[in-house]
Amino acid sequence: MNMESNINNTTNKHIISVKIGNINYNLSTNESDEYINGVAKYINNKMDELSSVYNSLNKNSTSFLLVLALNIADDLFKQRQLFNKNTKLISELENKINVLSSQNNEFENKLKDSINSCKNKEDSITYLEDKLKNLTEEKDKLISSLENQLNNVMTEKDNINSELELKLNNSLAEKDNIISNLEQKLKKALEDNETLNYELESKTNSLLKKEETISNLELKLKQNLDEKDSINNQLDNKLNFTLAEKDKTISELKQSLSEKELIIDNLKDNLNETTIKLSNIKDIEELEIEKDLQILDLEEEIENLKSQLKKLQ
């Protein structure tokens, strides 16, 4: 904590230890030890005074420090009002001095006029000299009185300035305490951030392990797909073999169909020969009917064979 004087900040700083509210502080300052101890005593007296009134508050609590700040601010405003009142009084006294000086000048002018008018009269001169002396004495007394009053006002002004500087330094001390608290909170926030980073790293490692597990599952899936392809190849080979057998069966059916067609042709030839031989129309008709029935049977059988052939294809 640094405490610097607004009047003389070029002197060498020194360290002084003071005790405020049961806590020791090392202060770097340009002020005298007596002045700093007086400031510390003022704060301690204020804290003791407030503790007797607000005995339920802890001296280090924010509420107590707020009440302390309000009381110091109240003293500051009262001193400012007193300072303004004294400043006004000084202004009035200065105006009175100016009026008296003006009157004195008038008296001196009148005296000079009287001296000039009574220059040849020694009694008048003596009288005027005595009167001037008395006026001068009265003027000196009045000036001396005004100077004393002015000195008193200046002394009060210096006291007010000292108190204002003290209160300003107290405000700076409070500001430093607030900054210290904020730094502690920031430190805690950084520690919490480190904890979150550790948890994030743990979760990341867990995720990497899961990805490794997924990779192993994908490898097993690939192996299963390879096994499936092998099984499909075996099924294709079996299917090709089955198709070959089906083609063989179709070929046999085609051969059987060709044989049936040959039989039909033979029957047709036999029918023609029989037709030539038979002269009886009735016999021919019966043969034709029989022939037609045989042809229908053979055609139906052929259609069945073709249907089986289509199914096989």
Image (spheres, rainbow, N blue to C red):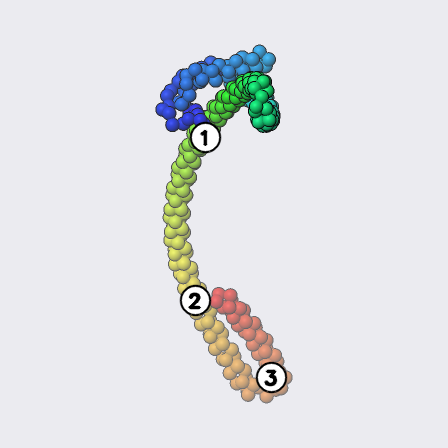
Q: Badge 2, how many Cα within 10 Å: few under 14, some, many 20+?
A: some
Question: Which residue corresponds to the image point at 59% horizontal and 81% vertical from the top-left?
Answer: 288
Residue of label 2: 247
Mark-to-mark CA distance, 1 and 3: 125 Å
Q: Which residue is drawn at 48% across and 14% down?
A: 41
Name the N-terminal-most of marks 2 and 1.
1
Q: What residue type is labelled 2?
A: Asp
Three-letter amino acid code at the position of disc 3: Ile
> Which tag, 1 or 3, sits closer to the chain's start?
1
Mark number displayed over residue 186: 1
Which image quarter is the N terminus in?
top left
Closer to the camera: disc 3 or disc 2? 2
Q: Which residue occupies the foreground of this view, 74 or 298?
A: 74
Q: In which quarter of the image is residue 36?
A: top left
**What kind of element bears circle 2?**
helix
Q: Name the residue under label 3.
A: 284
Dot 3: element: helix
The quarter holding residue 71 reads top right
Q: Which of 4 and 159 is in front in this view?
A: 159
The answer to whether residue 2 is left or right of residue 52 is left
